[in-house]
Amino acid sequence: MNAAIQFNDVSLTYGPETDLVKVLNSISFSVNDDEIVSIVGPSGSGKTSIIMLAAGLERATQGSIKIHGQEITGVKENELSDIRRKNIGIVFQSFYLIPNLTALENVLLSLEANQKYNLDSEAKSLLDEFGLSHRINHLPSELSGGEQQRVAIARALINRPKIILADEPTGNLDSANSNTMIDLLFDYSRKSKTSLVLVTHNNPLAERCDRIIELKDGKIA
Amino acid sequence: MLDYQQLLFIHRYALRDITRSYKKLWVISTTLFISLLLLSLTFSVKHSLSNEIEANSKELLGGDIQISSGIEPLQGLILEQLSELGQISETVSLATMLSKKGDTSVFVDLRAVDGNYPLYGEMKTIPANAGQELLHDAKRPTVLINENIQNQLRLNIADEVVIMGQDFVVGGVIASVPDLAQSAVFGEFAIINKDQFDEFNIGSRDSFLKHDYRLKLNQTEDDGKQIELIKSIVESDKNINTRLPKDSGQSLRRIIDNFSNFLNLVSVSAMIIAGIGISNTLLSFVNQRNISIAVKKSLGFSSNIIQLIYFYEILLILIFTSILAYCIGVMSPLLANDLIPKSFDIDLQTSFSFISYLNIFFIGLLVVLIFSIPSLYSISAIKAVALFRNTFQPVSLHFSAKNIFYLTLLVVVLVGYFVFQTEQQFFTLLYFMAFVVTIFIFYGVSRLLISLLKRSFDFSSNSYKIAYRNIVAKKSLAPIMTISLGIGLTLLLTLSFVANNLKHEISQSIPSMAPDMFFVSINKGEKDDLESFIKSIDPNVELEFSPMASASFVALNGTPIEEIVSGDNRSSWIVRGDRRISWLEKPNQDNLIVRGEWWEPGIQDQMFVSMDSRAAFDLGMKLNDKITLNILGRDVIGTVKNFRKVDYRDISINFAIIINEAFATKLPYEYIGTLKSELSADTIQSKVIGKFPNISAIKIDRILSKVGEVLNKIFIAVTGISLIVIVIGLIVIVSAVMVQTTFRRYNNLIYKILGVNFPTILKAMTLEFAIIYLTLIIFALTVAMMGSYFVVENILLLSWSFDPSLTLWIVFSTAAVSFLLILIANRNIFNPKVYPLIRNE
Ligand SMILES: Nc1ncnc2c1ncn2[C@@H]1O[C@H](COP(=O)(O)OP(=O)(O)OP(=O)(O)O)[C@@H](O)[C@H]1O
Ligand SMILES: [Mg+2]
């Protein structure tokens, strides 16, 4: 077993010396490469911050973060983009589909970011799997919230990432839709032995995961 | 580096994006299109006009070579030698009076031509065979007149007219002559037969004849050799000048060059203002799409690729609009054909050329690059983390050291590219510099306004508070409006001020100073008779006569004058061809001596010269310089004694060169006279012509109204063109307003919720507009007044005056149009629908 994500003594602070906001305080944990982990904790405890650090979208103030054994702190912006593209799929709370691209095009964009072109059939079959075959040529504004989130998940998964980071993916959905969504993510993770890090406020959902990391005031409780 | 697949992706993505969001890019398309069209029109018309001149250069000259011998005809021996080389056509030109029998007269440019005329091209007449009849079968003395003469004297074919006391019959009307004589196109022009000219001794009493010989070379021999031979034949005689086809149409070429230079500069100005719009639109485009950009970044796209996609979209717009603009531009000569007066007999051709297209495209590309770099680089400031926090900060123009370097480089390339294409490189560069300075002035003005308002905020009215907040807000309209409208207005005001000063000069200053009438070709013997005759008609008349001889400026201190004075010298007219000189024994009160002293009277064996001070300065003359004048074929060397300040505006008798009377009495001469009288000029004219048929009496009002007409046309053209800059400025402003509507609608909604009513919001908008407009107009007026003052006083050498009503008219009409457009662009902020906003925000 290898660690997909490894945080070692990671701290994150914002602002100047005089007005320092300590968001994460010397956190260490790791997530295995086939593990489903949930991060829970009160609002403002630093859950989203952990996801951003793991995705390489934010830089740690201190400590080391490794993605599949590769150190990402202190790595250049462009290299970070490469690592992110190759390893990580992100699902946001707000789905953030690109409004003037159809469902299919939104999914394809993720492939195109990896310079994989002309893979329409692959994207179509994934959308099909997600029950969206009749919706592939619709714009996001013509899709329901649940459909939009499924497209967003397809977009995150189409590259076969080794790590999925999801920040409250069901936060904007009703419970029925939430369940479908979670099933999709869990299925994928289990099938392709991929690590999934899930931030959630939903306790039953957290319980379904392999492990729960609980945050409080920037520390693991 | 990007590989082919990536480029293909960028291409496909941009194409798709553009077809789905073209509405947001309309400002870029329209402003680019208008300014490119202007540029393309300028290039095309200039190009085809120059081609037309090039293609017709032999027609314009009237032969393969033109030999001018001035007052005297060529010697028989030379003529004989020339006639062996080709066919000769001889022309004598003079200026004289043509009168309808027993009625009014006009001063005309009269040409006597022989049977070979024209050697190239054809003379078009109504009826069509009138030319043929005149030159080959004229039974009675016949004259062909142009339309201007026909209209002024209300003449019909077969009417009788009088020239120099000799009766002529009107044989027809000249529609066009191949050499485009200026008077044929704009003035009064008549042609008679050279044999009849000789037979009736028409030229015998006029000392300002001009003899021209045009030659059509025999086809058998090498043209270059023959022309060398001709030059060597006539070389010995200093009075003889030769001209070749490549020298023809010079003044036409100069006019075309100057006008197209002006148009070029205006199009670039339009282009740069369009660029400001592009920059603003792109920035708001980026801000509207910040979420999509952040998503792309989270998917792993680099800023570079995203920037490339957007840049490629603009490139596509540029390609599309430039092709369209070019095609319309290329077709424009066909339209110009309809606008050019028929008497030019010009038939412009359209010619597509990839190089000319690239020229336009390249200029467009530079402008687009310059103005899109700071906007597109702002993409790098959009961070993907914003997607987690749901907060999107608007980005602003990005100026890094690298950017500034690229921008400087591009600006230098643009300016350099433009400057090298124009004839007047120095003025073009000066214009660019003035333009950039003006942009910075207006940017500074807008910042000044904002900071002044921030400091002096102590009004209590609600409208003022709202207006104040709108102006000092981060996304204020103030900078964009100040720059784009400010520059257009400055240009319009400057040009109108200059034109208005010129018109004022023509319609008021000159007529009040100038005499009512000129008399020329007064023989020595006739002068006293004429004087007493006029005094018998009007005892109170102001009458002034000066003696006059013809001379040409040959050398200065022994150096041939052509080697000293280049063609673009302001005073080169003084050394071109024959000049009229006069003489005086005592200085004239009108002409102030600025340097040197007047000469001792009575010295007969030496020539002393008094020069126009401006010409002396332009030609680099000093006191006591030796100048060589050719007077009636004889070179005479004289000493420059003084410089006079000559005001040519009063059109009383002013001479650039005046010599001492004691020396001049030996010369053959005639008189020129001026008259100012309470009686009508028409009455005096017809009485004088009736009594003295050889004397030409020219009415000044006719000349002035002709100049006025031309100026009026130029004024309309120039203001019309500078209006385009204002239109583009307005489009930019409207687009800026529309980009703001969401933000403003939201603000207005909040005001509404706070209980501010509609009239207050409207008042606030009016106030906001008024404050910004007032500030910019103060500066535009200042810059325009300084600019036009400089041009009027230093280049046109007139005295500058200010016309408040014209200024008010421009200022208010622009204000009204801009404000109306802003209101229309803003129309949906007045009734903000509350619910959609609450749901969104
Ligand atoms: N740029 C910043 N500057 C200062 N403080 C920040 C900044 N970004 C985040 N914070 C602070 O960091 C803390 C952790 O934020 P984070 O978004 O990780 O919390 P969270 O656990 O995801 O909360 P929630 O459940 O509400 O989403 C918060 O207290 C927040 O105020
Ligand atoms: Mg969070």
Image (cartoon, rainbow, N blue to C red):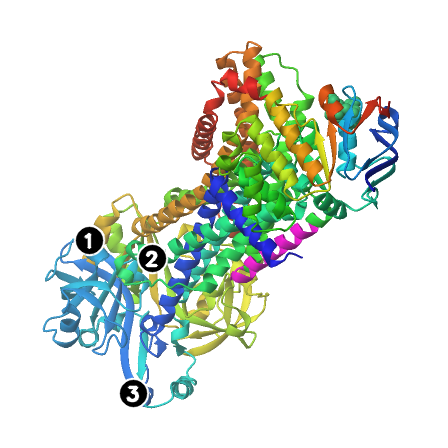
Say which residue label 1 marks. B151
Kind of residue indicated by mark 3: Ser
Q: Which residue is mark 3?
A: B83
Q: Are marks 3 and 1 on the same chain?
A: yes
Q: Which residues are magenta?
A: B404-424
Disc 2 residue crowd, few under 14, some 14–19, many 20+, Cα 10 Å: many
Same chain check for tags 3 and 2: yes
Magenta span contains residue B407: yes
* Displayed-image quarter of ligand 2: top right
Q: Earlier in the sequence, mark 3 or mark 2?
A: 3
Q: Earlier in the sequence, mark 1 or mark 2?
A: 1
- State the SS at label 2: strand
A130 in relation to B48, above or below: above
Residue for badge 2:
B673
Q: Mark 2 belongs to which amino acid?
A: Gly
User: Element at badge 1?
Assistant: helix
Where, by quadrant of the figure, is residue A25 drawn? top right
Residue A205 location in percent, x, y? 71, 23
Q: Is residue B67 visible?
A: yes
The image shows a total of numbered marks equal to 3
